[in-house]
């Protein structure tokens, strides 16, 4: 059976999202079709075969809408069109059709917390008077102090600096992210109506779902009260019961309405929330039966390579979503965090995922990180629920930590006063083939260099180099995803820990499948009565699983 046939036959189509493997396409860096050095829809269409061969079920495409790119497309100027640098509406339609023909679902990224400052609504707001209906779609306020020269409250931008910017007539507007990303006022009914209409616009064009950006941010506490805490405390994931702008209970009514829109379509239309919240319990609230289908499980991403915490996170993740009947998801990397090869290869740092917080580059053992990344992939794909692959995970890409200052584009770099280098290091264009940049990312004769420079040692991890190499990360991912599709125990379903030493994670998926992850510092024997399906590292001469490795076994 071909991969495409498997893709459309494995699970009940109405619940495909419960255990889908979703590939995150960071469009600027996936593949450049027109040779300008920036990835685009033409590039994706030309490379869909890679995704089919990899064996994923769906793609999530980062924002592809017209944008001044103050935050790499998360500053949307028009939610119903395609950024010219990425392609046209016709190309977008063709991509959806071609992906569907290969059995791949398409998930877009919706950004409801803020628009671009170039969005028509914000431009109208700027052109209108304080107190006008146009301004009421955002959060405009007079400043504090005698001449209004102080921001209206003490909130801070996630990217650094105050969350307020003053406009000419002396009012200030709120932006929890960059000043080019004004926050929408979700207390205004027009905002609700607009976003429900945007959902329909893309659903009508065959799009299968949305990843919801900053899903925990839209509702602000009435009166916008001060936080009364220092910057660092504010930036931490929600750690207080009544945070004035993160994870407020009011967001749930929005998602109930969105779910009604999704459910009005005969074929499933699904949501995945990017919600950075304080606990699995808080996350599960987004996943109640009349709300969102799934949410990223960032607790798993944040956990360090340590058996007790991994075990605890897995248990808690599974238990809390089960209470609301939702599946969990697993994710190791995305476009906002240091690539996991580079996190796992550093001294243990629980809860740290940005370059500014992790131990310095000198502490990185990339070989160790790669070894652990291989084991982590087998762990993740063996767990019940859905899984996310960030483009390049399947190649074992690492964080590019030595990008020159003058190429950095993440607004974090500027807004932090050049102290936090930001997220560009995980966004470097993919290496496809060849021995020198652009490594097949752009076509031959391209007019532009890749928008971020690729390091010379990407030559060792191109798709071309790894294809057919039995020891490569790509071969491991392909094998794991093939087995995951074919083995009835994998995906959604039963899960139970099996007895064993505390620093070895051993679990079964129903009677027929066992996964062993060795987090100890010595080789461990594998269950005697089982057949080895796949291992992330060669077994020892005596058939034991070495440290920092995982194995999949089929019970006899
Ligand atoms: C989300 C996105 C991130 C973006 C931010 C603001 O966290 O993943 O890339 O900068 O929202 O939209």
Image (cartoon, rainbow, N blue to C red):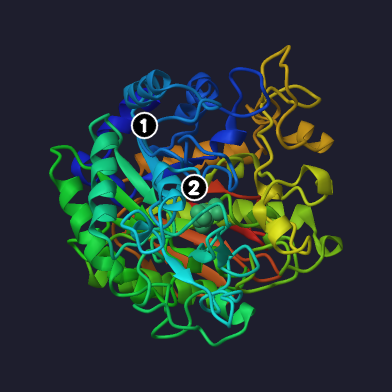
Task: Report the residue at 41% width, 62% height from top.
Answer: 130
Q: Where 337 falls versus 221 (above or below)?
A: above
Q: CA distance from mark 2 to mark 1?
A: 30 Å
Residue 384 shows in this picture = no
Q: Nearer the viewer, residue 537 or 385?
A: 385
| Residue at 24%, 42% in the rendered image | 197
Q: Position of residue 451 (x, y in %)?
A: 70, 33
311 or 79, nearer to the observer: 79
Which one is closest to the eye, mark 2 or mark 1? 2
> Farthest residue toward the top?
445
The answer to whether the residues at label 2 and label 1 have Cβ atoms under 8 Å apart is no
Q: Nearer the viewer, residue 356 or 314?
A: 356
For label 1, being within 8 Å of ligand 1 is answered no
The kind of secondary structure element at disc 1 is loop
Question: Is 388 above or below relative to 5?
Answer: below
Left or right of 192? Residue 358 is right
Residue 35 is situated, as x and y percent measured from the top left of the image, at 66, 18
- Residue positioned 69% across, 40% down in the render: 428
Residue behind mark 2: 116
In the picture, the disc for residue 104 is 1
């Amino acid at each position: 059976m071909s991969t495409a046939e498997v893709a459309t036959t494995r699970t009940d189509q109405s619940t495909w999202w419960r255990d889908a493997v979703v590939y995150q396409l960071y469009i600027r860096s996936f593949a450049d079709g027109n040779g300008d050095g920036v990835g685009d829809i033409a590039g994706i269409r030309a490379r869909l075969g890679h995704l089919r061969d990899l064996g994923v079920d769906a793609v999530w495409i980062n924002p592809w809408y017209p944008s001044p790119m103050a935050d790499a497309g998360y500053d949307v100027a028009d939610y119903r069109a395609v950024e010219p640098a990425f392609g046209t509406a016709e190309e977008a339609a063709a991509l959806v059709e071609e992906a569907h023909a290969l059995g791949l679902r398409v998930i877009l990224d919706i950004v409801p917390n803020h628009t671009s400052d170039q969005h028509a609504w914000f431009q109208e707001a700027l052109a209108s008077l304080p107190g006008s209906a146009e301004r009421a779609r955002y959060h405009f306020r007079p400043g504090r102090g005698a001449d209004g020269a102080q921001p209206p409250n003490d909130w801070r931008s996630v990217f650094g600096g105050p969350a307020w910017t003053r406009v000419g007539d002396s009012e200030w507007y709120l932006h929890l992210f960059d000043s080019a990303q004004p926050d929408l006022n979700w207390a205004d009914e027009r905002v609700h109506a607009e976003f429900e209409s945007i959902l329909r616009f893309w659903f009508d064009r065959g799009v299968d779902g949305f990843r919801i950006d900053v899903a925990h941010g839209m509702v602000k506490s009435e009166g916008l009260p001060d936080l009364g805490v220092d910057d660092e405390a504010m930036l931490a994931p929600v750690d207080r019961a009544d945070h004035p702008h993160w994870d407020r209970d009011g967001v749930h009514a929005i998602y109930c309405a969105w779910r009604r829109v999704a459910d009005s379509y005969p074929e499933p239309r699904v949501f995945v929330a990017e919600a950075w919240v304080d606990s699995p319990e808080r996350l599960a609230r987004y996943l109640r039966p009349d709300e969102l289908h799934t949410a990223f499980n960032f607790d798993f991403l944040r956990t360090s390579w340590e058996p007790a915490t991994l075990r605890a996170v897995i248990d808690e993740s599974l238990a809390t979503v089960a209470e609301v009947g939702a599946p969990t998801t697993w994710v190791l990397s995305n476009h906002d965090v240091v690539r996991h090869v580079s996190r796992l290869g550093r001294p243990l740092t629980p809860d740290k995922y940005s370059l500014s917080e992790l131990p310095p580059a000198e502490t990185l053992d990339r070989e160790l990180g790669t070894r652990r990344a291989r084991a982590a992939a087998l762990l993740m794909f063996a767990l019940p629920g859905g899984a996310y692959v960030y483009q390049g995970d399947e190649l074992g890409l690492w964080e590019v930590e030595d990008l020159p200052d003058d190429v950095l584009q993440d607004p974090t770099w500027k807004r932090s006063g050049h102290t936090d280098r930001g997220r560009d290091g995980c966004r470097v264009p993919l290496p496809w083939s060849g021995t020198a940049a652009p490594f097949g990312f752009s076509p031959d004769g391209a007019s532009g260099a890749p928008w971020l420079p690729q390091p010379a040692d990407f030559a060792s991890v191109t798709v071309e180099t790894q294809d057919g190499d039995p020891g490569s990360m790509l071969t491991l991912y392909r094998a794991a995803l093939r087995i995951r599709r074919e083995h009835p125990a994998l995906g959604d379903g039963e899960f139970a820990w099996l007895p064993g030493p505390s620093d070895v994670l051993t679990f079964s998926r129903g009677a027929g499948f066992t996964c062993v992850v060795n987090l100890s510092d010595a080789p461990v024997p594998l269950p005697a009565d089982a057949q080895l399906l796949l291992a992330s590292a060669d077994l020892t001469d005596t058939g034991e699983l070495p440290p920092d490795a995982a194995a999949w076994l089929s019970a006899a």
